[in-house]
Image (cartoon, helix red, strand yellow):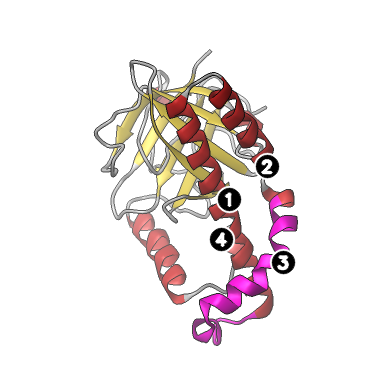
Amino acid sequence: MYRSICKVVIFGVMMLVSACSSDVSPYHGNQGDTPKVFDSQFFSGQWSVIKAQGKYTHFANRKPHIVSIYQGDLESLNSRITQNKVAGLRLETIVAAQGKSKIQALLNNINEFEYINKHYTSENIDSVQESTIYNGAKPLRKDFVQKNEANTLVFDYYNQNNVVVGLNAFVLFEYQHFSVLRKNQREHFAHAKTTYKQLGLDINIDVDFIMLNDKQNMVGIDVVNDELIIVYNFGRGERNYAILEKVK
């Protein structure tokens, strides 16, 4: 478990700040604790949205009241789908199925990133057909998923009436290890690093974990303490963050 009293989380769909927000300064370096090992169970539970800044897509107007975070391994997601279906919770069943689909797609994407880095160089990758990469990486998918599905998170968003209004999926993305990427990916990630450096945040050192979300944007999570986290969405050229406080 990480130390302290509060926690701030900022993610790629909303922005939040906690009761201890006076002690938190987004875009001013790494806040609080600096855990070295990602543990999805640390984030599991319900978080209240304290503060958010920036413009998001369809969640911007829904202003989620509670964020339920849980590990997105496929066994847990299948169990969640079954339980919701048996209980007759149609909306929850649909959302859980969407979460499973998004997690699978993200894991497949990062599996392809690993395949590219093992078999291609920056000089020849842009001339390779997508189908070649897909077919080459596909046999490795099952083993990759088994090794990495614990490094996943799903955020379910609930409004004040306790109705689920959407979700986002995230997979740990140690992008520093991927020196070979396609042109659009290289440009996208390079733009994020440069843009947020100008906004006062060094992606390499000012967040504890980098995730890839289901919008193919990098998301930074800064653990402030056991009760507070900050989530940064690096997909836009503006300050997008959310601060979350864990519900006790």
Label 2, residues with CA under 10 Å away: few <14, some 14-19, many ≥20: some
Question: x, y (%) of residue 93?
Answer: 50, 30
Tag 3's secondary structure? Answer: helix
**Tag 2: residue type?**
Ala
Tag 2's secondary structure? Answer: loop
**Tag 3: residue type?**
Pro
**Front disc: 1 or 2:** 1
Which residues are drawn in magenta?
Answer: 120-145
**Tag 4: residue type?**
Asn
Tag 1's secondary structure? Answer: helix
Query: Does residue 6 lie above or below 192 as drawn?
Result: above
| Mark sitting on residue 104 | 1
The answer to which quarter of the image holds residue 20 is top left
**Front disc: 2 or 3:** 3
Give the residue drawn at x 53%, y 12%.
Answer: 248
Q: CA distance from mark 1 to mark 2?
A: 12 Å
The answer to which quarter of the image holds residue 165 is top left
Q: Is residue 90 left or right of residue 123?
A: left
Read off the residue under disc 3.
139
For marks 1 and 4 on the same chain, the one whose residue lies earlier in the sequence: 1
Read off the residue under disc 4.
109
Does 233 lie within the magenta span? no
Q: CA distance from mark 2 to mark 3?
A: 20 Å
Q: CA distance from mark 4 to mark 2?
A: 16 Å
For marks 2 and 3 on the same chain, the one whose residue lies earlier in the sequence: 3
Query: Does residue 128 lie above or below 234 as drawn?
Result: below
Work out whether residue 70 or residue 1 is closer to the camera in this orientation and state it.
70
Q: How many marks?
A: 4
Give the residue drawn at x 54%, y 34%.
Answer: 223
Q: CA distance from mark 4 to mark 3?
A: 13 Å
Q: CA distance from mark 1 to mark 3?
A: 15 Å
